[in-house]
Amino acid sequence: MKEVMKNMNNDSKFGVCSVSFRPLSAGDVLSAARDAGLSCIEWGGDVHAPPSLGLDALRALGRATRDAGLAVASYGSYYRLGVSDHAELPGVLAAAKALGAPIVRVWAGGRGSAETSREEREAVHAAAREAVALAAREGLCISLECHQGTLTDDPEAALSLLAECPGESFGTHWQPNQFHDEAWNLAYASAVTVRVKAVHVFNWSLSSEGKIVRHPLADGAEPWRRYLALLPAAAPRFLEFVPGDDPAVLGREASALRGF
């Protein structure tokens, strides 16, 4: 895992989350990423690379990704610490390994930090220790999804969870929270930066009705430059959910990302 991260230099760390294009086939996602000049991908564990696909098919997808000139930089699972059945975890790790992904993204529970009871929090923390131990045996890193409705919706809660396993095998993805302002997001990025394994990149705002509105990434260049200045240079940057879910704009978005 360390070697893969070291090899994520400035030319190879720009990628896309396959969940950005759930209606597309995996082959079409690869073509879009390659045509956009991207160099890595986070395969999603819901549509394109679920564990149920089978290890042979997952190995083939990993080979196809590398043959297309992209690295499999992360596996975006939907395993929820403290919520999902523990029996699912070995299959998730096996899927990541079959793909050749060094990082396995998991979710920190099923409730926001303010709504999580002490017992639920303890269950999430215990599940994290288990997941990290199992992943480390396979040479994999566990990384938290940074998202509303989980224990990563607050930097203090995220840091408390990350403290359960302080080594290289446990970290977090990072993305700005559209429900907070730039100052809050900068403070969060600064607080967790040494544990950040990957970044989800998008430019969203909230409408007056509270709905998410997606904007061209270039329109958010200044905040993103400030965010990325705080985050590890080696952490892959994955474009996520582009405007209109349109693969035709991926090249434009990739160009903007490389310019940051």
Image (tube, rainbow, N blue to C red):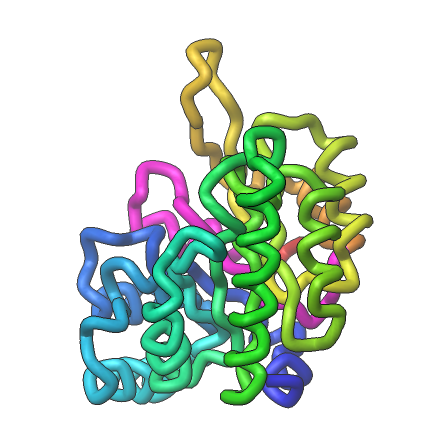
Asked if residue 200 shows in the view, the reply is: no
**Percent position of residue 143, x then y:** 57, 64
Work out which quarter of the rendered image holds the N terminus and state it. bottom right
Decide whether residue 240 is among the magenta residues.
Answer: yes
**Percent position of residue 180, x then y:** 65, 27
Task: Name the residue furthest top.
Answer: 208
Residue 11 versus residue 132: which sits nearer the camera? Answer: 132
Q: Quadrant of residue 58?
A: bottom left
Instruction: Report the side of 108 relative to 76 (left or right).
Output: right
Instruction: Report the side of 187 relative to 237 (left or right).
Output: right
Q: Quadrant of residue 171?
A: bottom right
Residue 44 versus residue 39: which sits nearer the camera? Answer: 44
**Percent position of residue 121, x then y:** 59, 46
Task: Name the residue furthest front.
Answer: 119
Specify start and end residues of the magenta stretch as a single range. Answer: 231-257
Work out which quarter of the rendered image holds the C terminus and state it. bottom right
Q: Residue at x 48, y 57 (%)?
A: 81
